[in-house]
Image (cartoon, rainbow, N blue to C red):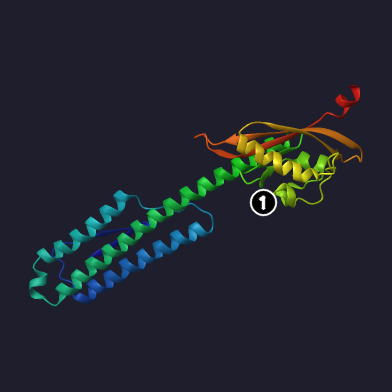
Amino acid sequence: MIVGDDDPGYLTIRGHSGDNSQPAAYMAALSTILTKERASLVGLAASWRHGRRPRLPTGTELAQNAAVTLALFISDAASGWLEANPISLAVVVLAVLLSLTALLALAVLRMMFVQRQKLAEAERFMQQQAALAQAQLDAVPFPILIKDTAGTYQALNGACLQRLGIDPVHAIGKNSLGLTGHRWLPLADGTPAAQRLQQIGMDAVSENKVQRCELDYVSHDGRQRTGLFLEAPTHAPDGSATGSIGVLLDITEYGRSN
């Protein structure tokens, strides 16, 4: 029996028909097989941990290695050596099973690595898309507020912080009633602006139509401004409601001219 190592990441096995080696020789060869298989598994895991894409044996390679391993022991059995050494039958069978088990482990590990790589690539793609969407929101000079069906903020753009004092990082996961540090001014009847915002968001979803109202706020320059707040319902591709999106348009100069 000869164990080759032509490819550092893959084990190949060659045999000589009629080899009259003793059981100890088989066990030594088996030990070499398992040692190299273990080293291959450890190498693959190390490559993955360090962010390198490991070289994984293909399904064809694994099948070929299993077939060659099995053929090797069948060839030795057919040579007549086992007839003279019946005790070695158990050794050969054990060697075949252990070798094939090691190959099966490699096959399973390959499937796990491939699946994990696909998941990692999908996660990177989603992160890139989220970053792109946020950059597009931040490019809009008017405050944009995106909520779910319960009125909880899912995304805001940078203009919310500049014009309204609402920090997007702190607003995510809260509703209008839970916001702090904003510069909304109460309505003429004394109703808190946050309460009005919460209500029109819920109305946009329940009535499935655009809601609008005028709200006063203090801009970053310390001056009072008047804004037209529009909130529209949003939908998934199947038509189901996903929440609402609101935008604040500064109409201060328009109001003064009229």
* x and y percentages locating residue 169 in the rendered image: 72, 50
- The three-letter code of the residue at mark 1 reads Gly
Figure quadrant of residue 251: top right
In the image: residue 60, left or right of residue 137: left
The quadrant in which the N terminus is found is bottom left
The reply to whether residue 141 is visible in this rendering is: no
Q: Is residue 247 above or below residue 183?
A: above
| Element class at badge 1 | loop
Residue drawn at x 49%, y 58% as measured from the top left: 47
The quadrant in which the C terminus is found is top right
* x and y percentages locating residue 69 in the rendered image: 23, 60
In the image: residue 227, left or right of residue 211: right
Depth order, front residue of 124/100: 124
In the image: residue 33, left or right of residue 227: left
- How would you rate the neighbour count of disc 1 (Cα within 10 Å): few for under 14, some for 14-19, many for 20 or more? some
Residue drawn at x 12%, y 66% as measured from the top left: 77
In the image: residue 219, left or right of residue 238: right
Q: Residue furthest top?
A: 258
Which residue is label 1 attached to?
A: 173
Residue drawn at x 15%, y 62% as measured from the top left: 74
* x and y percentages locating residue 107 in the rendered image: 34, 56
